[in-house]
Image (cartoon, helix red, strand yellow):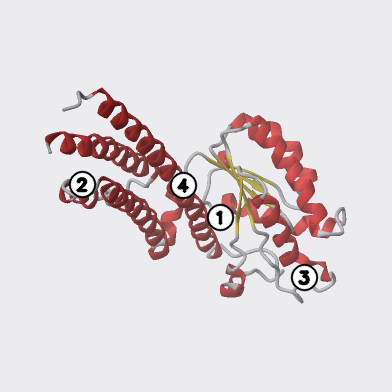
Amino acid sequence: MKNKRMKVLSIILPILILLLVIVILAVRKGKSEEAPVDTSAGLAVIQSQESKDVDEVIHKIRESSGDILREEYAERISAIQQDENLAWSMFDDFLFVGDSRCVAFVTYGFFNEENVIAHPLVNIMSHLEPNIDNIVAKNPGHLYLIYGFNDIECGRWHQGEEFAEEYGRIVDTIHERLPDTKIYIIATMPVIMGRKYTSSYDGYTLIPDWNQQLAGMCAAREYVYYLDTAYLYDQYQDLYTDDGVHFFKEFYPHWAAAILTCQYQYELEEDLQAQAQAQAELQAQDQTDIQVQAQAEPQE
């Protein structure tokens, strides 16, 4: 009985260590303003399951550690939904690059110039590609790209698939030079047709299709994430300026909160997958250790 108990603990204790490491990493990724993650639930599971089957204990621990991750991300999302202005302090090691819609992050005072490379009337060929060296020099951990409106208007691409292919080529180059940078392509916000700058060109109606092509391009790459914030169009048309293209200052906290919400959903999924892989590897190693120990024990 004593040997069996020791075998159980030999599996439980390493997993507990892994659980605590995961929690520490999650807290480091979180914002300092929020309450710390409560690990008591995971500890309680371990303490209450010692006498049960090993596989059942491991299953319970996995569930508990996954719940902790989900709770941590849920707290972040809930915080910015309750107060969207918190979003500005939650961007970390980042750079925004894009067109006039991106410029407004600086002109409205939300970001410093050092965190934004943007200019009006530009597209991915006239602005993003020529700025690759500048992006690499800044070496951001998180790179957010905002293009699309001018790209449709410039006439270089006749289909969204062609645009997405060119976009993909450029982000591939950025990834090759910044392999540790996470790249986020933000959905092109639709325009309000019939306004000052949208009444004479119906090509803007292609934005949803082009966004769909961008989503597919991102899905084919592990290091590029498509942030679908275009749903804000339906909620905040009153925050568009008279031209039907740009946004009043009040729109930007909504946009920032939506960007982070989409990002956190990706990060949670990745963290859960990494956690499951780490636990599976640890369990396999522990089972090997137990077998070696059992073989080494003298037969009665």
**Residue designated by label 1:** 108
Labels 4 and 2: the sequence-earlier one = 2
Labels 4 and 3: the sequence-earlier one = 3
Please name which of the two marks, 4 or 1, marks the residue nearer to the observer: 4
Please name which of the two marks, 1 or 2, marks the residue nearer to the observer: 2
Q: Distance between the residues labelled 1 and 2?
A: 50 Å
Q: How far apart are marks 4 and 3 (CA)?
A: 38 Å
**For the residue marked with disc 2, what is the amino acid?**
Ile
Q: In this view, does 191 lie above or below 30?
A: below
**Badge 3, how many Cα within 10 Å: few under 14, some, many 20+?**
some
Labels 1 and 3: the sequence-earlier one = 1
Image position of 292 (left or right of 271): left
**For the residue marked with disc 1, what is the amino acid?**
Tyr
**Residue designated by label 4:** 273
**Can the viewer see residue 122?**
no
**The label number, if any, that marks residue 46 in the structure image:** 2
Name the one closer to the observer, 269 or 191: 269
Give the quarter of the figure containing the N terminus.
top left
**Can the viewer see residue 231?**
yes
Residue sitting farthest toward the left: 2
Query: Picture coordinates of residue 104 (x, y %)?
Result: 61, 54
Q: Give the residue at x 68% y 71%.
A: 242
**Figure quadrant of residue 169:** top right
Name the one closer to the observer, 27 or 195: 27
**Badge 4, how many Cα within 10 Å: few under 14, some, many 20+?**
few
SS state under label 4: helix
Labels 2 and 3: the sequence-earlier one = 2
